[in-house]
Amino acid sequence: MAGSTSWIYSLVKRRGNATGGLGRMFIMARHGETILNQEGRLQGAIDEPLSDKGRRQAAALVRWLGTLNLSIVGVFSSPLKRALGTAQCVADVWGTHVKTSAMLRERSFGVYEGLGRDELIARRNALDLPNFEPTKDWDGVEGVEPDKGVSDRFFSVVEEHGLLELSRVSDVLVVSHEGVIEVAMNAFFGIRAPRRHIFKIRPGGSVGVDAAAGGYKLLHLWPNPGE
C-alpha cells in the first residue's frame, strides 16, 4: 500500500464505520452541473465551476450519501473546479480532506471541446463518424483521448492508493466525470460494445460498487434528482 494512504488508515482505526461494522463500498460520483452542461456543450478540460443548480446537486449528493450510513474516510477528486467543488461538499460533512489527481480529469476532447450538440454532430458527419452516441463514441477519432487512455489513468490512481483494498474496510469516494466513470464501470463489469453506454451517470449522481475479492457487485446507481 502506498504510503500516501496512511492518513486514511489512521482515520479508519480511530473512527471505524458509521454502521458499527466494516464498510464495503467504492463510490464514484459525477460532479454537479456547470453552465456548459446546461448549454449542452462538451467540456473536457474546460475548467468551469459549479452552477447554482450544480451546487444544489452537490448538496443532494451529500444528503443521499448520508442515508447510506457510510464512513467515508477517503475522498479523491479530479482537480477540475466542477469536480473539486462537489468533492469538497462531501469532505466537509464527513470531516476529511480531498486528495486531487490529474489522472481523474475528464477525457480530453481536443478541438471538439466547447461544441454544442448540433455543432458536434456536424463535425462528426463531416468525418463520417457514427452519431448514435455522439458525445461518447470517440475511439479512433484523431486528437481525442481513447477509452483505453482514460481507463489506464483512472486505474493508475486506484492502484497507487489501494482504493479497492481500502473500500473493503471502509468507504471511499472518487469524484470525477461522466466519461471517466462510464469507462471505469465498463472495465469493472467487462462491458464491451455495443452495450458500453448502459451506465448513465447524471450530474451529481453516484454509483456504488462492492469490490470484494474475486469480483464486483453493483450496489447502487443513483441519478440525483436535485434541482
Image (cartoon, rainbow, N blue to C red):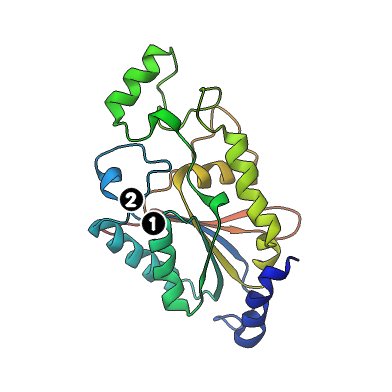
Q: Where does the image place residue 225, in percent across and percent down from the top left? A: 31, 57
- The answer to whether residue 190 is above or below residue 78 is above
Residue at the spot 24% in from the left edge and 40% down from the top edge: 39
Marker disc for residue 36: none
Could you give the CA–CA distance between mark 1 and mark 2, rounded to whole angstroms?
6 Å
**Residue 194 % position (x, y):** 54, 27
Task: Name the residue furthest bottom.
Answer: 14
Q: Residue at x 37, y 14 (%)?
A: 125
Q: Count every numbered label the image shows and give the total.
A: 2
**Residue 187 seen from this side:** no
Q: Indicate whether 40 appears above or below 83.
A: above
Q: What percent of the width, then of the height, locates residue 153?
A: 62, 46
Q: Classify residue 113 as left or right of residue 139.
A: left
Check contact, mark 1 vs mark 2: CB within 8 A: yes
Which mark is on residue 48? 2
- Of residues 143 and 68, the one nearer the viewer is 143
Image side of residue 26 versus residue 93, left or right: right
Give the residue type that dot 2 points to: Glu
Q: In the image, what residue type sits under mark 1?
A: Lys
Q: Secondary structure at mark 2?
A: loop
The residue beneath circle 1 is 81
**Residue 151 higher or lower than 88, as above or below:** above
Quadrant where the image shows the C terminus: bottom left
